[in-house]
Amino acid sequence: MVNHATITDSPAILTPVPALSDNYIWMVQKNGHVIIVDPGESAPIEALLTHGLILEAILITHHHGDHVGGVRALQQLTGARVYGPATETLPYCDVPLREGDVVQLPGTGVRLEVLDIPGHTAGHIAYHGLLDAQTHVLFCGDTLFAAGCGRLFEGTPAQMLESLSKLGNLPPDTLVCCGHEYTVANIRWALQVEPDNVALQQRARDAAHLRTQGLPTVPSSIAAELQTNPFLRTTYAQIGNAASHYAATMLETPQAIFACLRQWKNDFK
Ligand code: ZN
Ligand code: FE
C-alpha cells in the first residue's frame, strides 16, 4: 500500500488508510513528505511513519471524534502543523481555516483551497486542489460520500444541498476522498431511488467486487457521483418522482426533494 521511494519530485501517492471500524484517514505522500486528513486514531499512521516518512501536516474537516481522535498524539509525536475549521472546537489546531483560505504545503508542493460546506456539522470544511499537474483531489470528510451524503447533525437540508452543489461543481475528474467506507450500503439504498440507472447498477457490481477482495471503493470521482448519487441528482425528474412517491405528496423544490431523500436514507434498513 505504501511506496517507500524518496526520489526527488516523485509523483504524489494518494492512499486511504483504514481506521476505526469504517473510517479512512487519507494520506498524500510525495518526496518523502506526508499529509494526512482526519486521523480518527493515531496508531495506523504511527505504523506507517516508522518507515522514515515526515508527517508535515494534519488536515481536519470537522470536529467529530472519528475524524480528530488521533490529532493530538500525532501532533505531539511529529510536530506536524494542524489545519482545521475555524468555527469548530477541535482538540488542537495551529491554522484555523474558512472558505477561500489556501493551504500551501512546501514539502509536497501541494496547494489546497478551502470550501465551507455546512450541513453534517455547522463548521464543516472541504479541501480541494491539485496533487500534481493532472490530479484534482477533494477531501470532503462526512459531507459527500460515494453514492451518499452525511447525516444532518448540525444543519438544514437547504444548507447541505448548497454544500453538495459546491462540490458537484468541481472538475468532473476530481478524486473524491470521503471519510467512510459506506459505499455498498449507500448504493443498495440508491438503487431503491433509481432502480433503472444503468451506471448505478454497474457501480453496485464494481463496489461489491472490490469489497469482497477487501479493497476500498474510494476515491470516487465527481463525475461518478453526478451519475449515481441521488443527493446530487435532485433536479432529475426520476429522482423527484421517486421522492414524491416515498413522501406520498408532490415535492416541487430541490430542497424538499433533498430533505425527503435524506429522511428516506435514514429510514432505510
Ligand atoms: Zn462526522
Ligand atoms: Fe465520520
Image (cartoon, grey):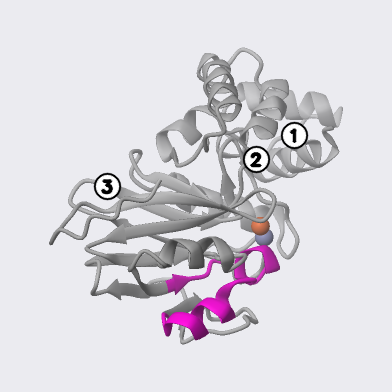
User: In front of the other: label 1 or label 3?
Assistant: 3
Residue 257: name its quadrant: top right
In primary-sequence order, the first of circles 1 and 3 is: 3
Whether residue 241 sits left or right of residue 19 in the image: it is right
- Residue marked by disc 1: 251
In the rendered image, residue 225 lying in the magenta stretch gets the answer: no
Residue 238: name its quadrant: top right
Dividing the image into four equal quarters, which quarter contains ligand 1? bottom right
User: In front of the other: label 2 or label 1?
Assistant: 2
* Residue that appears at 54% across and 64% down: 38
x then y, percent, for residue 186: 67, 34
Q: Give the camera-side residue of 30 and 185.
A: 30
The amino acid type of the residue labelled 1 equals: Leu
Q: Quadrant of the C terminus?
A: top right
In primary-sequence order, the first of circles 2 and 3 is: 3
Local SS, label 2:
loop
Marks 2 and 3, how far apart in space? 24 Å
x then y, percent, for residue 190: 67, 28
The range drawn in magenta is 58-80
The label on residue 182 is: 2
- Residue marked by disc 3: 135
The amino acid type of the residue labelled 3 equals: Thr
